[in-house]
Amino acid sequence: MTSDAELAVALAQGAGAVLLGLRRPDGAVSGADGDRLANEYLLAELATHRPGDAVLSEEAKDDPSRLGADRVWIVDPLDGTREYAERTGETWRTDFAVHVALWQRDTGLVAGAVALPARQRVFGTDPAEPLPPLRRGGPLRLAVSRSRPPVLVQRLGELLPVELVGMGSAGVKTMAVVTGEVDAYLHGGGQFEWDSAAPVAVAAAAGLHTSRLDGSPLCYNRPDPWLPDLMVCRTEHAPRLLAAVAQLEGGS
């Protein structure tokens, strides 16, 4: 039987193939179609391979019965809809993702995968992604939105030497911490559980620090799937980042 971690990878890859197949040579693509069709694929595959599990998806009506389930798949069929539909000349943007995670009662996130379909990459929890050597010296590189860098991250520059690195979806930002392209991803503007569940599962399995901005644990499959904030970083950077955020929050 396929393990949960293997299934997560296969589902993320499959949904990614659906998304890439919708990008037409004439340059037209519908983000709404991508959301819908990738979601239909994930729901059908989960119904086939894990029929007894519940699902929380960005693109499906929330079924409150998930709150009593022991296993819940938390999925974002297309993380970065705007990025998915954008191109410049002949070049499509590549900074969108597919998120597939499994939450288990009394344990939390137990498996997950993040696919970056346009980059032919998929990151899973088993085997965990190997982290590159820690970069020494220089400013902390922080992943931020290309168009809307959060005020919190900009204010961190008042306390720490930082470099803001613009990129697209939450999955892409978190995987950039895994690969070492950046040192941390902090988000203070609120997200939904499907925005971070799979990226956090992959990051935690790789040995990264994952938490709320106050250092408290990230909790999933709650009645309200809104998560106010998030921090993913190398464990070596966590203490000073948490201290700097606390200083900013204390002074605001």
Image: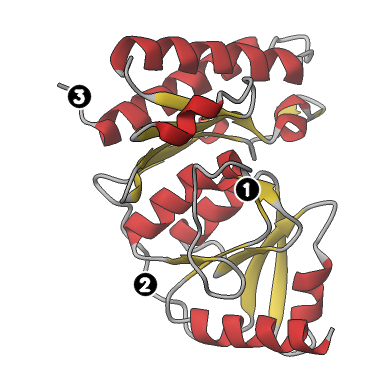
Q: Amino acid at mark 2?
A: Pro
Q: Nearer the viewer, residue 177 or 65?
A: 65
Q: Nearer the viewer, residue 198 or 237?
A: 198
Instruction: Judge whether 141 appears above or below 190 on screen.
Output: below
Q: Earlier in the sequence, mark 3 or mark 2?
A: 3
Q: Earlier in the sequence, mark 1 or mark 3?
A: 3
Q: Earlier in the sequence, mark 1 or mark 2?
A: 2
Specify whether 182 is left or right of 128: right
The answer to whether residue 167 shows anywhere in this view is yes
Is there CB contact under 8 Å for labels 1 and 2?
no
Residue 222: where, in percent of width, then height?
A: 54, 45
Question: Which residue is labeled 2 in the image?
Answer: 133
Question: Which residue is labeled 1 in the image?
Answer: 170
Is there CB contact under 8 Å for labels 1 and 3?
no
Q: Amino acid at mark 1?
A: Ala
The answer to whether residue 120 shows anywhere in this view is no
Specify whether 174 is left or right of 207: right
